[in-house]
Every structure is written in C-alpha cells, then in structure tokens.
Amino acid sequence: MTEKKMSLIEHFNELRKRLISIFIVFVTSAAVMLFFTKQVYLWLVSDLGVTNKLAVLGPTEIVSVYFLIAGVVAIAVTIPFAAWQLWLFIAPALSVKERKVTLSYIPAIFLLFIAGIVFGYEVVFPNILHFLLGMNDGMFDVLFTTDRYFRFMINVVLPFGILFELPVIVVFLTNLGILTPIRMKKMRRIAYFVLIVIGVVLSPPDFVSDTVMSIPLLLLYEICVTVASITYRRKMHRKRTAEEQISD
C-alpha cells in the first residue's frame, strides 16, 4: 500500500515538474516576444488601410496590447513543447510502437494550431470585420481603440487554433477505441447543434458573422468523421494482420 502511495506521489511530482516547465517556456516566450511586439502590431493592423495607428484610452491599454500579442505568440510556441512534455509523462506506460505513434502527433498538433490561426485571421476575421464596418453606412465616425480591436481579433481567431486540434484528438480517441466513425455519424445532429451554438457564442451578434463562424466548424466536423474512418480502417487492418500472424 505504501509503495502504491509513493508511486502515486511520484507521478504527481513528475506532472508538477512538467507543468512548471511548460509555464516557464510560456513566460520566457512571452517575455522575448515583448521585444518584437511593435513589428507584429504593425503587421496586424496593416489591413486596416486608413492608418496604422489605433486609439488608446489610457496608458494601461498600451501595456495590455503588448501582453495580448506576446501571450498569443507564446501560446503558439508553447503548444509543441507542452505536447512533448505530455508525451514524456505518458511514454513509460506505452509500448515502443505506441510511443512512435503518439510522438508523431506533436508536429501535427503544432501545424494544425497554426493552420487554425491562419484560417481564422485570413478568412473569418476579415469577413466579420468588413461586414460589421459595412453596417455603418456612413452613420458613424468609426474609431478603433487598440484594446478592443485586438481583443475582438483574438476572440475570433484563437478559437480556430484550438478547434483545429480536433482531428488529432479524434485520431487519438479512435485508436483508443473510444470513438468510431459510426458513433460520430450517429452524433452528427447533436454535434452540429453544439458547433453552431459555439459559432454563435464566439461571433458578433449578427446572422452573417454567425454563419461565417459556424460553417467552418461544421466542415471541420466532417473532416474529423473522415479522419476517424481512415484511422478506424487502418486500426482494423492492423488487428486482422496481427490475428493472422498469431494463427499462422
């Protein structure tokens, strides 16, 4: 009993060390990024067209924007390291083959996050922004405050970086036998409803923005169903091959 308790304590200590390492990498990345915030800021506001300067309502907003930009970039940098630390934590419980398979997830996690960020920034964000500005129709003097502009951008873009991780999660759960393509197809209506609700919550309160946000999520779900089908077929093929080798 004592050995089991000690083993459990050791696991928690190791997990704590991994989490501390992830936190240190995040903080370090954010601190380094603070020196390059101006260049990233100028690039992000270049699409506004009229001016590259945004209004601030106080000195604290300047600090807020610096930390917002540095924080998002730090998240992108930290994700592959966090995935690697998670792999190191669970690796002792895996077979050699399982270690190789799970290790291959790490680049996919990083690339899908970046793809989600790029999609959200290049496709979803400008469409929502241009639609909302088009509603002005000369009625108002449009003045962007820096803090609100970047918070709006992050609220639109960052969720796509997270949601684009779904294919990796689906592959992982399918390999574990928790998910199957049949089960995902049966859950399609419920999943569609949940994803539409997420799209409505994350987007500004208008029909076009809700649609622009929701449709990519529905397409992403169908991609996940396809990925699950491919993964499931490969898993069944490996299982049949193993059974044939045993019978021989």
Image (cartoon, rainbow, N blue to C red):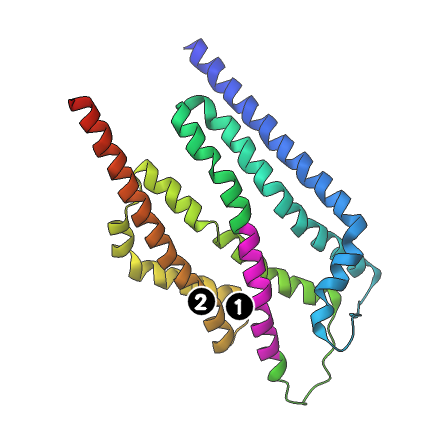
User: What residue sits right under mark 1 in the picture?
Assistant: 203
Mark 1 and mark 2 in contact? Answer it, CB < 8 Å.
Answer: yes
Q: Is residue 133 above or below residue 54?
A: below
Residue ranking furthest to the front: 248
- Lateral position of residue 161 relative to residue 168, left or right: right
Residue type at numbered disc 1: Ser
Give the structural element (helix, strand or loop) at label 2: helix
Q: Quadrant of the N terminus?
A: top left
Residue 46 seen in this snapshot: yes
Q: What secondary structure predominates along the stretch shown in magenta? A: helix
Q: Nearer the viewer, residue 20 or 239?
A: 239
- Lateral position of residue 205 relative to residue 196, left or right: right
Task: Indicate the position of residue 128 as horizontal and vertical percent values.
Answer: 57, 73
Please name the residue shown 43% across and 62% down the image.
Answer: 217
Residue ranking furthest to the left: 247
Q: Which mark is residue 214?
A: 2
Q: Nearer the viewer, residue 205 or 219?
A: 219
Q: Residues in magenta? A: 113-132
Please name the residue shown 74% across and 66% down the image.
Answer: 146
Q: Nearer the viewer, residue 245 or 145?
A: 245
Q: Nearer the viewer, residue 155 or 237?
A: 237
Give the structural element (helix, strand or loop) at label 1: loop
